[in-house]
Image (cartoon, rainbow, N blue to C red):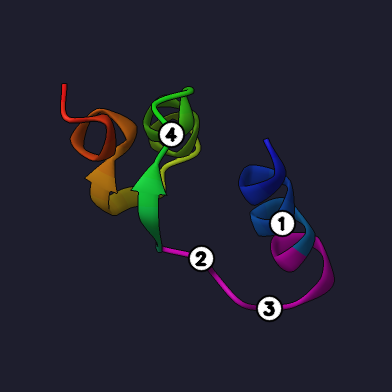
Amino acid sequence: GSSIKAVQRIHDATDCEVVAVISIVDREEGAVEAFTSAGIHFESIMTRSDVAGQ
């Protein structure tokens, strides 16, 4: 959602290339897949399942 849109805005407005995104918590709602399909590495410190203890 909003993170992939932010990366697109950075790409459109600057000469910068986003090569990776680091998140504290991966909510497990498709971010890994979205960033992978955009060619951007996604890494998180923990997942929602980790926090929930599942």
Q: Nearer the viewer, residue 42 or 47?
A: 47
Distance of label 1 from label 2 (alpha carbons)? 10 Å
Amino acid on which the number 2 mark rests in the picture: Val
Q: Which residue is mark 1?
A: 6
Quadrant where the C terminus is found in the figure: top left
> Residue 12 occupies which quadrant of the picture?
bottom right
Q: Which residues are magenta?
A: 10-19
Q: Which residue is mark 2?
A: 18
Comparing labels 4 and 3, the label whose residue is closer to the camera: 4
Q: Secondary structure at mark 1?
A: helix
Distance of label 4 from label 3 (alpha carbons)? 29 Å
Q: Residue at x 48, y 23 (%)?
A: 29
Distance of label 3 from label 1 (alpha carbons)? 14 Å
Amino acid on which the number 1 mark rests in the picture: Ala
Sooner in the amino-acid sequence: mark 4 or mark 1:
1
Q: Which residue is mark 4?
A: 27
